[in-house]
């Protein structure tokens, strides 16, 4: 697998895991975004991990609580399902104020809403204008069928904070889509 799609898939998975692990009260609305001036995510006040003689604080969660105006991500209502099982999802995004690399990630579920499959990732430009995104990938462990599915798209930044870049979510969207052959 080429490095860029593999990196995007890993980042997408990390974003989904971070969202899944965040406390329910910290979750932002579907259109939420982190302000460009937002502080770094909260760090654990609980015991920090020890690496050698250095103490490292671990992020508790990185889900923004406030939305930034003018940032968004959309998911088109039709996704493509190729004969070889490759899914292609598309949409638009708009973001501003990044200091680290930004990606548009997507995840799809069809039969069981608890099982989400990361579908590729796209490098994003946060210049305040609306751009299109397109992510493609294959799922393992499940055969997708044409018909209804659910997609979550996220605009996620890896903001440099100390030694470790932390995820900052600019926008998320949930959308029911129809997968069509083609």
Image (cartoon, grey):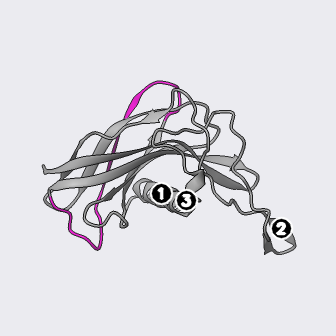
Residue, disc 1 = 7
- Image: 55 above or below 136: below
Q: Secondary structure at mark 3?
A: helix
x, y percent for residue 116: 37, 63
- Image: 58 above or below 51: above
Mark 2 Cα shell of 10 Å, populated few (<14), some (14-19), many (≥20) = few
Q: Secondary structure at mark 1?
A: helix
Mark 3 Cα shell of 10 Å, populated few (<14), some (14-19), many (≥20) = some
Q: CA distance from mark 1 to mark 3?
A: 16 Å
The residue lying furthest to the top in this view is 129
x, y percent for residue 65: 61, 44
Which corner quadrant of the image does residue 21 belong to? Answer: bottom right
Comparing labels 2 and 1, the label whose residue is closer to the camera: 2
Q: Sequence-wise, which precedes: disc 1 or disc 3?
A: 1
> Residue at coordinates 64% horizontally, 33% vertically from top-left?
36
x, y percent for residue 170: 54, 40
Mark 1 Cα shell of 10 Å, populated few (<14), some (14-19), many (≥20) = some
> Residue at coordinates 44% horizontally, 58% vertically from top-left?
3
What is the tally of numbered marks visible in this picture?
Answer: 3
| Residue 135 is a magenta residue | yes
- Image: 119 above or below 155: below
Q: CA distance from mark 2 to mark 1?
A: 28 Å
Q: Sequence-wise, which precedes: disc 2 or disc 3?
A: 3
Q: Is residue 66 left or right of residue 148?
A: right
> Residue at coordinates 66% horizontally, 53% vertically from top-left?
165
- Image: 16 above or below 47: above
Please give the range of residues in magenta.
125-145
Residue, disc 2 = 55
Q: For the N terminus, which image quadrant? A: bottom left
């Amino acid at each position: 697998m080429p490095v860029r799609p593999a990196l995007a898939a890993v980042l997408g998975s990390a974003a989904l895991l971070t969202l899944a692990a965040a406390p329910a009260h910290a979750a932002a609305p579907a259109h939420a975004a982190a302000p460009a001036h937002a502080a770094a995510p909260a760090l654990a006040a609980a015991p920090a991990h020890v690496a050698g003689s250095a103490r490292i604080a671990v992020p508790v969660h990185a889900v923004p609580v406030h939305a930034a105006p003018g940032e968004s991500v959309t998911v088109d209502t039709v996704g493509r399902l190729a004969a070889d099982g490759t899914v292609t999802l598309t949409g638009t995004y708009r973001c501003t104020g990044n200091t680290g690399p930004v990606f548009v990630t997507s995840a799809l579920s069809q039969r069981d809403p608890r099982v989400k499959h990361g579908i590729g990732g796209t490098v994003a430009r946060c210049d305040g204008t609306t751009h299109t995104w397109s992510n493609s990938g294959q799922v393992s462990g499940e055969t997708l069928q044409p018909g209804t599915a659910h997609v979550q798209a996220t605009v996620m930044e890896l903001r440099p904070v100390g030694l470790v870049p932390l995820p900052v979510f600019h926008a998320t969207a949930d959308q029911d889509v129809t997968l069509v052959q083609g």
